[in-house]
Image: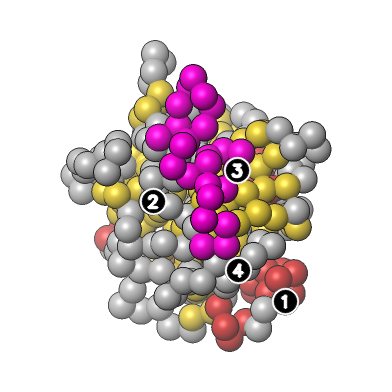
Amino acid sequence: MRALKKLRAGIGAMAAVAALVMTTAVPAGAVTGDYVEDHEHPFVGLIVFYDTDGSFHHRCSGSLLSPTVFLTAGHCTAGATSARVYFQQDAGAGWSPETGTDPDTGYPDACAEGTLGTLCAESDEIYNYGFTGLDAVPETKDAGLVILKKPIALPEYATLAAPGTLDALAAKRGQQETTFSASGFGVSDVNPVSTTSFRERLMAESKLTNLTSATNDGYNVQTNGNGNGRGGTCTADSGGPLFYGPLSSNIITGIISFGHNRYCKGTGFSYRTDRQDVIEWITSTAGLEPASIVVEDPAGH
């Protein structure tokens, strides 16, 4: 284990800063706070996007729904022409500023020898649900898909909660006790003088804060990672999964999307995937049968 070992957490995003009412919406980043290394979700990958010249542009996180269908954020896929996904838990932990690469994985410009089609995959088939910009909160259409050239065979993949799964929580008494968890490769600590990024897959639990505010309004879910045993999201966690339930869950209810400040102080927003239109876009674009990726009753997860 090259870089981490202790509890602390954070999950993030990459995109432009956008005005939001009296505050700021910024792309989500890495797991922060009380986090642990994530060996529970091998289908969560570190995705690197490239521009038309094939040059590194930005990185995000995301989840495999099938051997070739990778779900991430719309603001991650917007403007990208190709991508590469790494599924090692420590995919970029050995990255060197001197060489500009990780010698063990090839991150961010290549798949290490012997990993293509097993722990690394490439794509030039990239889709966007129609990301409208973070100034369009609450309905940002922040969903994206990347179709891999070679399938990644895993024992299990992520699944999606059925349409309306979270609606019942909106009026539920004691909703703040509802547990969610997130996983991603984002920045773990950001402050005015330094940034800490392990480039490892980390995970943490958080609690539901709100589903019905003007910032959420049925399109986003707001969670809070502040407090003992909790973790939030931050830059480069964008696109990663928000699971319904504890760290063992693989049922996605949201895509890590944005936060209210650049320093990732616990409160995060995820674009809801438990909506009929989003699920229909994902399944039709990817050519999947809904029954193969949608879980009707996630209770207990």
What residue is shown with label 1?
Answer: 287
Picture coordinates of residue 88, whole percent (x, y)? 43, 52
The answer to which of marks 4 and 3 sits earlier in the sequence is 3
Picture coordinates of residue 137, whole percent (x, y)? 64, 45
The answer to which of marks 2 and 1 sits earlier in the sequence is 2
Does the segment drawn in magenta span residue 22? no
Cα distance in 3D space between marks 4 and 1: 15 Å
Identify which amino acid the numbered label 4 is placed on: Pro
In the image, the segment drawn in magenta is 94-118
Locate residue 59 relative to residue 298 in the image: left or right: right
Mark 2 secondary-structure assignment: loop
* Residue in view at x 31 percent, y 42 percent: 9
Nearest to viewer (mark 2 / mark 1): 2
Contact flag, marks 2 and 3 (Cβ < 8 Å): no
The answer to which of marks 3 and 1 sits earlier in the sequence is 3
Does the segment drawn in magenta span residue 111? yes
Callout 2: few (<14), some (14-19), or many (20+) C-alpha neighbours within 10 Å? many
Identify which amino acid the numbered label 2 is placed on: Gln
Visible residue check, residue 167: no
Picture coordinates of residue 287, whole percent (x, y)? 72, 76
What residue is shown with label 3?
Answer: 110
